[in-house]
């Protein structure tokens, strides 16, 4: 079976692996299977035929497949046909998932997994892991879904099934994309594409092309998406899956939209809309894409027609996450046509719907908790029914023995007490989770407050450094120059003074003080940093240190031809200045390497020394790590990542990674 889910703007195709017959059989197969079942005796062959019928019907109608899956499971259990029980349980889990009966599907997957373990069938366990990933995914438990997809791919690899290994791998990548792990998805998708190209598997390659374009666009890097757009667009006319075709044309349109080729974008959006209308597949989102593009092309009348159609379809389908995006485009339309009152009203509606989307996400989390509660409640109802049945039997036998009646009454009381205890325990657990969620929100707000405070403090420090450096240079620097001029004039007017030790020492001290003043002003705000950039400033600093003979510093720079934002350069200079000063004071090193590596928006800065090394945790406990604390606060200001690798006697390596942005200098990065 194939389960499709529209994933918050990202297209995800969740593939389920059929354990029995082929999903999507040709017409007439169901009729043939019905004729076989009409005469088949209640044996293991009938079990397999029922399972085959379930997969045949389940490809298009899960509700029609359910009775056959249940019959197969019941008959296999009566026959004690373990393999048949496992296959039927797997089928029933698949059917229940398509019917949104997640508690029942989970129980069937537990049964199938246990039986396949007993049967020592790792190939079947791999399919169960993939189905378990789908089960978690459809309940928005994305981290667990990714974990089980990874387990399924590993299991298929271990049994040498390289064909089926691709399916959970594709599912895992879609889930990671849903978690916004765009860089990791791109890296893994590129590896997968190489394997698929070797096998010439164009159908699976199309999914990878689609995913690569989608994730590069999510990272606002359309140039990186370009190599995958043309092969995807060329493959789509040959595809049979209307959903994939619609989403494929839409993502190609989004690429051309991103590079401002609106005519091409409009063409592909309209192709997507034609397929969507033909197959009744969510045409609202494609009307929205067309309307937004027409607004950019200054065609408000045509844009309004599509936006109104999108709004009508989204409202009918109750897709709030799409409606709020439509309202934003309607606001732009009204503003473009000078109807500012209506634009304001549309923006108000956009704000309300946006809040509703956030509330929906919170409700989804609560729904998962409620599902756990409902599952427990159903267990309690089953136990209650069993208790009622037991009481009925005891009432019939009460005429023969009062002892049995008393024992049954005691058992019933115990069951009810246990049910009450479970209910209270569950309520306490739900309350605790609610409190933890609230505390997490409080912690997040506190972290945001601390970050804003840190930004203000560091900006204030740099402004004060700049002011002091300017005052020293313009004020005291000028005074020292005047004093030196007076001494020079006095030496020419009274030549005998040039032979006086006091006069000679006074001139020398004045020169020394002026040089020290220039050095202090330079350290506060190096002029070369402002004029020539970060690399030149570090090279000058390294040259001064190396010239002193205390330490030999080498500087390497790759991809640094274009300068960074000035605030970013100043902050990185302070970080490196502090690191190099720490090395000179504490490391006992003879050589230091400072290396810059920039690739697109990524910047990596590495500082390595051959000093004595240290234990970072022990140093933090002994002296509070004041120097490293300053470095870490500045790295946090740039929202980067800092890693220190040091061992005693083996030197120290400090690595910092930043994601650069043309408008902001450096922004947050993440590790994969």
Image (cartoon, rainbow, N blue to C red):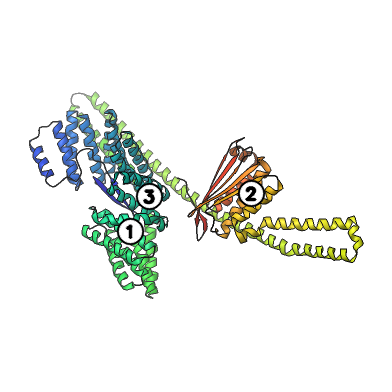
1 or 3: tag closer to the N-terminus: 3
Q: Are marks 2 and 3 in contact (CB under 8 Å)?
A: no
Residue denoted by label 2: 578
Query: Looking at the image, which residue is at 23% across and 25% down?
Result: 402
The reply, left or right, for residue 87 in relation to residue 468 is: left
Task: Give the secondary structure at mark 3.
Answer: helix
CA distance for labels 2 and 3: 38 Å
Task: Give the secondary structure at mark 1.
Answer: helix
Q: Residues within 10 Å of mark 1 (few under 14, many from 20)?
A: many
Examine the rendering and report whether any part of residue 359 can be seen. Answer: yes
Q: Residues within 10 Å of mark 3 (few under 14, many from 20)?
A: many
| Quadrant position of residue 466 | bottom right
Query: Looking at the image, which residue is at 38% across and 64% down?
Result: 350
Pinpoint residue 601: horizontal percent, then vertical percent.
Answer: 48, 55
Q: Nearer the viewer, residue 271 or 313?
A: 271
Q: Residues within 10 Å of mark 2 (few under 14, many from 20)?
A: some
2 or 3: tag closer to the N-terminus: 3
Q: How many marks?
A: 3
Residue denoted by label 3: 177
2 or 1: tag closer to the N-terminus: 1
Residue denoted by label 1: 252
| Quadrant position of residue 654 | top right
Pinpoint residue 450: horizontal percent, then vertical percent.
Answer: 55, 52
Pinpoint residue 265: horizontal percent, then vertical percent.
Answer: 33, 63
Query: Looking at the image, which residue is at 20% across and 44% down?
Result: 23
């Amino acid at each position: 079976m194939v389960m499709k889910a529209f994933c918050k703007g990202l297209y995800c195709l969740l593939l389920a692996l059929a354990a029995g017959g082929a999903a999507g059989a040709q017409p007439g197969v169901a009729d043939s299977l019905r004729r076989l079942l009409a005469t088949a005796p209640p044996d293991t062959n009938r079990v397999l035929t029922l399972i085959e019928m379930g997969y045949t019907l389940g490809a298009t109608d899960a509700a029609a497949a359910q009775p056959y899956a249940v019959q197969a499971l019941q008959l296999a259990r009566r026959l004690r046909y373990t393999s048949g029980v496992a296959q039927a349980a797997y089928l029933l889990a698949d059917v229940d998932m398509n019917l949104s009966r997640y508690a029942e599907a989970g129980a069937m997957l537990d049964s199938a997994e246990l039986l396949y373990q007993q049967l020592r069938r790792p190939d079947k366990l791999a399919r169960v892991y993939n189905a378990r990933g789908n089960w978690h995914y459809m309940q928005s438990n994305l981290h667990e879904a990714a974990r089980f997809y990874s387990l399924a791919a590993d299991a298929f690899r271990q049994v040498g099934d390289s064909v089926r290994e691709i399916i959970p791998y594709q599912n895992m990548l879609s889930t990671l994309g849903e978690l916004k792990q765009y860089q990791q998805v791109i890296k893994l998708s590129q590896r997968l594409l190489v394997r698929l190209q070797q096998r010439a598997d164009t159908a699976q390659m199309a999914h990878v092309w689609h995913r690569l374009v989608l994730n590069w666009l999510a990272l606002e890097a359309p140039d990186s998406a370009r190599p995958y757009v043309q092969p995807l667009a060329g493959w789509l006319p040959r595809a049979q899956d209307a959903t994939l075709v619609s989403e494929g044309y839409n993502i190609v349109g989004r690429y051309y939209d991103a590079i401002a080729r609106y005519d091409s974008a409009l063409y592909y959006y309209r192709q997507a809309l034609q397929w969507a209308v033909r197959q009744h597949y969510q045409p609202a989102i494609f009307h929205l894409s067309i309307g937004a593009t027409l607004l950019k092309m200054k065609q408000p009348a045509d844009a309004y027609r599509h936006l109104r159609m999108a709004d009508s379809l989204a409202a009918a389908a109750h897709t709030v996450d799409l409606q709020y995006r439509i309202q934003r485009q309607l606001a732009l339309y009204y503003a473009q046509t000078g109807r500012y009152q209506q634009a304001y009203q549309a923006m108000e509606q956009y704000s309300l719907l946006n809040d509703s989307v956030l509330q929906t996400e919170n409700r989804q989390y609560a729904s998962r908790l409620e599902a756990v509660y409902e599952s427990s409640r159903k267990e309690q109802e089953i136990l209650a029914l069993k208790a009622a049945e037991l009481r009925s039997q005891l009432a019939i036998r009460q005429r023969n023995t009062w002892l049995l009646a008393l024992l049954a009454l005691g058992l019933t009381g115990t069951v009810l007490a246990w049910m009450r205890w479970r209910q209270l325990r569950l309520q306490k657990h739900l309350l605790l989770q609610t409190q933890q969620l609230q505390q997490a929100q409080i912690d997040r707000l506190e972290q945001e407050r601390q970050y804003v405070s840190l930004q203000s403090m560091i900006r204030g420090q740099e402004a004060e450094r700049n002011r002091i450096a300017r005052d020293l240079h313009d004020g005291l620097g000028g005074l020292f120059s005047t004093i030196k001029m007076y001494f020079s004039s006095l030496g020419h007017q009274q030549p005998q003074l040039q032979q006086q030790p006091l006069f000679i020492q006074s001139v020398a001290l004045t020169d020394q003080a002026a040089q020290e003043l220039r050095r202090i002003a330079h350290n506060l705000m190096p002029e070369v940093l402002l004029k020539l950039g970060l690399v030149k400033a570090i090279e000058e600093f390294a040259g001064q240190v190396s010239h002193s003979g205390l330490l030999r510093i080498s500087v390497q720079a790759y991809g640094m031809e274009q300068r960074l934002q000035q605030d970013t350069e100043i902050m990185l200079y302070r970080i490196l200045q502090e690191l190099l000063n720490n090395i000179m004071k504490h490391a006992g090193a003879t050589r230091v390497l400072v290396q810059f590596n920039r690739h697109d928006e990524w910047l990596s800065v590495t500082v390595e020394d051959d000093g004595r090394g240290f234990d970072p945790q022990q140093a933090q406990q002994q002296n509070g790590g004041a120097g490293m604390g300053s470095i870490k606060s500045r790295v946090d200001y740039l929202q980067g990542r800092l890693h220190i690798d040091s061992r005693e006697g083996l030197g120290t390596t400090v690595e910092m990674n930043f994601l650069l942005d043309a408008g902001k200098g450096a922004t947050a990065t993440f590790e994969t």
